[in-house]
Structures are given as C-alpha cells and as structure tokens.
Amino acid sequence: MSNLKNIQNRFFNLHFNSTDEEFNAICMDVFHYQLQHNLVYQQYVSNLKTDIHQISHYHQIPFLPIEFFKTQRVVSSETTNNTICFTSSGTTGQQVSKHYVNDIQLYETSFLKGFELFYGKAHQYCILALLPNYLEREGSSLVYMCNHLINLSKHPMSGFYLHNLDELIKTIETLKSTGQHVLLIGVSYALLDLAEKGVSLNHQFIVMETGGMKGKRKELLKEELHQILKEKLQVETIHSEYGMTELLSQAYSKQNGVFTTPPWMKILIRDVHDPKTIINTHKSGGINVIDLANLNSVSFIETKDLGKTLPNHQFEILGRFDNSDIRGCNLMVQ
C-alpha cells in the first residue's frame, strides 16, 4: 500500500512542465503494477504475445479496449465494502460499462486537482448542474463529481436541475444581478432546451457542455452546437468537459473544442488500421487515454473516440467509430 501511495504522490506532483522522462517513469511503474495485479489486463497482454521486457516507453504499452469494462471486472486490487461502482448510461437492454472504484478519495483528488488547475477553487463559483439524464439513474461518476463541487462551492443557489428549467431561469436572473461567478454545466440537449427558452447570460457565466444528445435530439457537430449556444445564450465561448465512466480524470476545453489534459493524463492517437501503432501529432486516429489516476483499475485505455493530438497536452475530438466501420470513419476524418 505504501508503494501505491508513493506512485500516487508522484503522478499528482507532475506539472505541465514535467519532462516526458518523468511521466514515462511513472507510467512504467503503473504498468508493471497493473500487469501484476489486474488479472483482466494481465490476460489481455498475455494474449497479445507481448514481450513485456521490450517495453520501455508508454508508447509501447498495450492499451486495454474500453469494451472490457462492459463484460469484465477490471480491477487492480481487491474490491471492498467501500467500493463504489460507477456505471455508464445506456439504452434499455444495452450493456453498460462498470468501473469499480475502491478508493473514492483518489477520484476526488483527481477531479478536484484537475478542476483547480483549469478553473480555480470551487468556492469561487455558484455551480448549476443541468444533468437530467444523469440524475435519472444511479452510478454516474459525473453526478458524483458535480455534487462534490456543489458542496464545496457553499453557495446557497448551487444545485442540480432536472427538468425544472423555469426555476433555473429564475436562479440565473437572480445571479446576474449579484456579480457572482457562475459555472453552468449541462448535457448538450438540456443546454439547448434552456437556450430555446430565451434566457441570456453575461460575462459572469461559464457554460460547460458535457456529453451528447443522449437520443433526445438530433446529433450536431460540436462547432454547430457551440455556435447555437453562443448565439442564444449570448456568451463568447462554450467550454467542454471530456471524461467518461471508465476514467477518474477529466480534460477541459475553454474554447474552439481544443482540450487540455491535466499533467497525470495523456492522450495518444493510434492508427485505426493498426492499433499497436501510435501516430504523430496533428494526424487523426483512435484515441488512447493514459489516466494515471486509474491506479486501481487500468490506466491505459483504448477508447472508441476519434481525434488528433496537438502540442502542449492538447487534443481535439473528431467523432466516434465502431469496429464494424473503421474504414468509413477513417475516411470521414481525413
């Protein structure tokens, strides 16, 4: 356990100017720990016939396909009575991802440090969370994060909103007259519903969208969604949060859909035709995520998102693909 705490302290002490060598050294320690203790990951790496003695850089580490979280218990340590299981959203009958977190303090440290890096302390904000589809089910890691931030904000008007948009608008109008900084975080379709009510915001407000339309509306390109929200809500920029059930860290975009990761998280781009090959900055492909905070599950995840990396810990999301249509999606993002 002391060794785990040592690893945890090392990656949370990384900063934006940390060297690749520093990051790589921690990655290698996490990789070997998870290879030894995570039986699902161990079997996956074994089935790849990977010579682990030849792995010296995180580019060479095998990334576990995210689908394993739907069918396997992906853990690197024993679950306990205190273990929390976060689940993904899904339509009726659809298999959901399950992320078993036996150290909730690790998650809290990750999302708080990440939030503070990009936005400062939660108590500087009134936090309004418009997350109806997440609130309507149990096990949402996003709701857990927002609830923690709302409690830390200590603002009497901070809170969750389900479908009560008129009440939210009254809260917004009151806040506009106070000079209070406000973070309005919402799922895309709910923010559109709010925007169509004719409410206008001002410079006090940060609008952050997370997630897609969840089957409630026609999917829009990110640029189109942001343009509509900017015009209707009368704000200069739309922020975005990039996270998922299977991760314990988040990346944030403050404008133009360009995301930045915290120092203990890194995005790599893989060739969609050869998943073992990591490709260069500015070229599009499948997104691999290194999330060192995922110490007790797996830190190296192959996602179903498409994107490209940029300098300075930054990346863009270009869409999603599934295995049945890799070729078509590859053409789509040329």
Image (cartoon, helix red, strand yellow):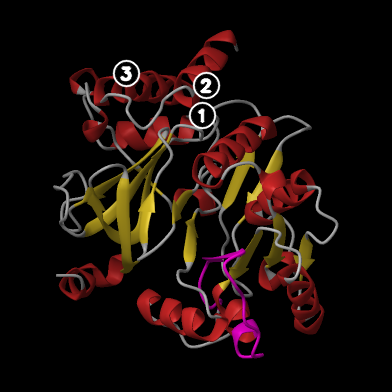
Label 3 to label 2: alpha-carbon separation: 13 Å
Please report whichever mark, 2 or 1, sits nearer to the chain's N-terminal start.
2
Label 1 to label 3: alpha-carbon separation: 15 Å
Q: Identify the residue at horizontal 69%, vertical 53% (top origin).
A: 125
The image quarter containing residue 184 is bottom right
Q: Identify the residue at horizontal 51%, vertical 49% (top origin).
A: 69
Label 2 sits on a secondary structure element that is helix
Label 2 to label 1: alpha-carbon separation: 8 Å
Q: Which residue is mark 2?
A: 8
Quadrant the N terminus occupies: top right
Q: Amino acid at mark 2?
A: Gln
207 magenta-colored: yes
Label 3 sits on a secondary structure element that is helix
**Disc 3 crowd, CA 10 A, few/some/many (<14, 14-19, 20+):** some
Q: Nearer the viewer, residue 231 or 108?
A: 231
- The dot on residue 25 is 3
The image quarter containing residue 11 is top left
Decide whether the magenta segment is chiefly helix, strand or loop. loop
**Residue 148 rendering spot, x and y as whole percentages:** 73, 46
